[in-house]
Amino acid sequence: SPKVLSLTMVDLPGLTKVAVQDQPEDIELQIRDLNVQYASNPNAILLAVTSANTDLASSDALKLARELDPLGERTIGVLTKLDLMDPGTDASEILHNKVIPLRRGYIGVVNRGQRDVDADLSIQVGLRNEERFFRTHPTYSRDRYLMNKLGTTNLARHLNGILISHIRECLPELKMRITGMMGDVQSELDALGSPEDENDEGGSRSALGGKLLGLLSKFSANFAAMIDGRASNTNQHHDGMPSLSNRGGGVSSYGNGMGGIGMGMNNMSIGGPNNNSSVIGTNADELYGGARISYIFHQVFARSLNCVGAFDGLSEEEIRTTIGNANGTRPALFVPEISFDILVRRQIRRLEQPGVQCVDLVYDELQRIASQSEPSELTRYPNLRDRMMDVIGALLKRSVGPTQMWVSNIVRVELSYINTNHPDFIGGSRAVARLMEKMANEKERASKQAAINQVNQQQNNGGTGHNGANMTPPKDRPSSRGDEEIGATPLSSSSLEKYMVADDGYSSNNHGTLPQHVVVDRNGPSNQDGGGIMNFIFRGNNPSSSGSVGGGIKGNNAWNNSVSANRGKSTHGRSTNSNQNPSGGPPAIVQLPQVPDTMRQTDAPPSDRERVETEIIKSLIDSYFSIVRKNYIDMVPKTIMYFLVNHVKDEMQNELVSELYREAEVGFLMKEAEDIALRRRTCLEMRDLLSKALEIVNEVRDFNTFT
C-alpha cells in the first residue's frame, strides 16, 4: 500500500495440548519451540491473540509473551471474536487495560467467520462489516476511547506507529552508517579510477605517463612523510597493505545491521564502522614510521651498549698476565702503559658488532616503511607495484654496505689513536690518588673491625683466660702464619715451598710432599739467624741447628726413596745420595727445577704490587672505555641517518623516475589488474544501492502515521 510501510507478519501456530490424527506425540513441545524461536527476536512485536469469549487469565499466548517480554515493551494484546460474546457482555474492561495490564494495551477485532470465507466474502467487505459492528454496538459506540482501540484498521495504524517510532530512534545512527559506507565506496571508486580509453592510443599513452609520474611522486612523498612524522592522516594500514587489498570479491554486506540492504550483492564487503582495517595514526598505542627508527636508536641500541661493561670478558688474571708481558725482562718502576693500550683496544673492538646490527635493524624498518607508503591507487597496477618494490630494495641494499663500513670505521678511528689527554680521561695521577684513598679507607675499616673483634674476644674470655688459656699479648706470641703469609716478605724456606714446583706438578701444598731437589727443615726454629735464603742453602754451617739439619736430611732421604719407589725409575742427576754431604752438611750441589713449557702469571698469588697495578689499569680502562662508548652511541645514529635514511629519502624519487619512467615500458607498467573492472562495477552497484537506502531513511523521517 502507498499509505503504510510494508510489515513482515509471521502467523505462528496456536499452542496445542493434545496430538490429533497423525501429529507426533511431542507436538506441544515442537510448537512451543517454534514460537520461542521467532518471538525471542528483540526487534519483533508480539501479538498475543486471545478469544474475547474465553477467560483471559487462561491465555497461553499472554503467558508465553510475559516469559519472552517481561517488561512488556513489545507485547500487544489482540482480542478476537468480540461478535460471539454472550448478549449483555462486552470486553470494555479488558480494552481499558484493567484486567491484565499491558504497557501497549489491547485492541479488539472482528474477523470473517467460516461462513464468510466459504461465501468468498472479500477482505474489504469484511472490514466494512467490522466497522459497522463496532459503530452500532450499544457499548463500544458510546466510548470514543474504545473506538480507537477497535478494528483491524486501528491495529495496523498502531503497529505502523510502533515501527516508525523504533526507526526514528535508530535513524541518526542508521543514516550515519549509510553515509559512512557511501564515503568508503566512493573512496574505493576514486582509487580504482575511471576505465582507461583504449581507443585513443596516443592520448592514452601520454595520460598514462603523467599518471605514472604522479604515482611515483606520491609514493616518494608518503615515504618522506612517514620518516619525518607527518603521515598521521594517511590512509595506509599497519600491515603495509593499502585499503584496497581485498582482491577476492569487493565489498561485503552489512546484512543484519542494515536489514537486508546487501541482498543479492554476492557477499560484498565495504569498510564501514565494523571493518578491521587499521589506519596509520588512528592507533595511538603503536609507533610507526620514523618513530620506530628513533626507538631502535635510543631504546634498543643505546640501552644495549650502556649495559656493556668495561671488563666484560676480561678477568683480573688476564690483566696481570698482560702487565707481566709488558714489563719484559725487567720489572717496571711504574705501571707499564703498553698493557693499558693492549687491554683497552681489546674492549673497544667489542663495540663494532652492535653498531653493524643497528644498521640491519634500520634497514628492515625502511623496508617496512616503504611497504606502508604505497598509495591506494597503486593496487590497480600490480606490474608497477612489483617493479617499484624491486627498485626500492636495490636502492636500500646499495646504501647498507657503505653505512656498515662507516660504522665499522668509527671503531677503527678510535683504535687508531688512544687519546690519553682527553679532558674526561681520569689519567694516571688521579687513578693512583683514587686508589690510595680507597686503600686508606679499607685499611681504616679493617683496623676498626680488628679492634672490635679483639674487644669481643676479650669479653668472651672474661679477661683471665678460661680453661688455662695463656693470655699472651699478640706482639709476644710466636708467629703462626707459616705458609699462609704471602707478599713482600723476606724469602724463607716456608715461602719457597709455595713457589717451587717439581717437574711432575707436585708442590708443597699437594699431599704434604716436597720435590726431591729441595731440602727443608720443617722443625727448625724461626729466628733471625735461621731465616732467609742463605740460611736455607747453607744450613749445615750453623752449629745451633746441626741436630735439626741431620733430622731434616734423614727425612729428606726417606722422602726421596719413597718418591723414587713410586715413580719406578731414578731421576738422572737428581739423586739425593750423590748430592748429599757424608759429613751431615748441606747438599754439595743445589739444582734448579725444570722450566715448564707453559708459564702463567697466575700460578703464584698476586703480590701487593701486582694488586695495585691491576687496580690502576682497571681504573684507566673503565674511564677510557666509558668515553669511547659514549662517543660511539652518539655517532652511530648520526652515521646511519646520513648514509642510509636521509640518502634513501632524498634519492628515492630520482631513482624511481630514472628506472621506471621509460616510454617503452609505460604501457606494461600501467596495465590494470584483471579484477579491477569487476571491482569497479561492484562498487558502482553498491553506491546506487546505498543511495536508495538513504532515500528510504529520509522518507521514514518525514512519514506521518496519521495522514
Image: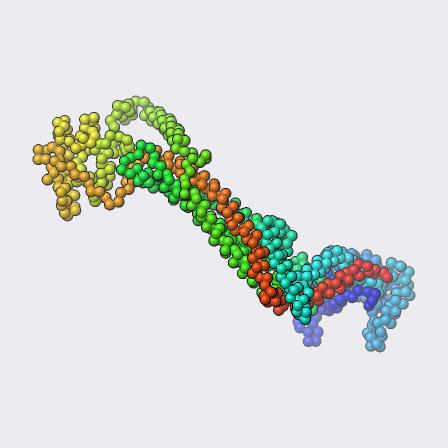
- Locate the C terminus and report the quarter of the image it occupies: bottom right
With 16 as the anchor, is 637 left or right in this view? left
Q: Is residue 90 visible?
A: yes
User: x, y (%) of residue 658?
Assistant: 57, 59
Compare residues 653 and 139 and report the one nearer the observer: 653
Compare residues 295 and 461 and report the one nearer the observer: 295
Colouring scheme, one of rainbow, by chain, secondary structure, one colour: rainbow
Q: Residue drawn 44% across and 48% down?
A: 408
Residue 142 is drawn in which quadrant?
Answer: bottom right
Residue 267 is drawn in which quadrant?
Answer: bottom right
User: x, y (%) of residue 43?
Assistant: 73, 60
Compare residues 443 and 525 and report the one nearer the observer: 443
Compare residues 299 and 164 and report the one nearer the observer: 299
Q: Can you name the residue that lies furthest to the bottom here?
A: 119
With 66 as the anchor, is 534 left or right in this view? left
User: x, y (%) of residue 541?
Assistant: 13, 29
Q: Residue drawn 34% across and 34% down?
A: 335
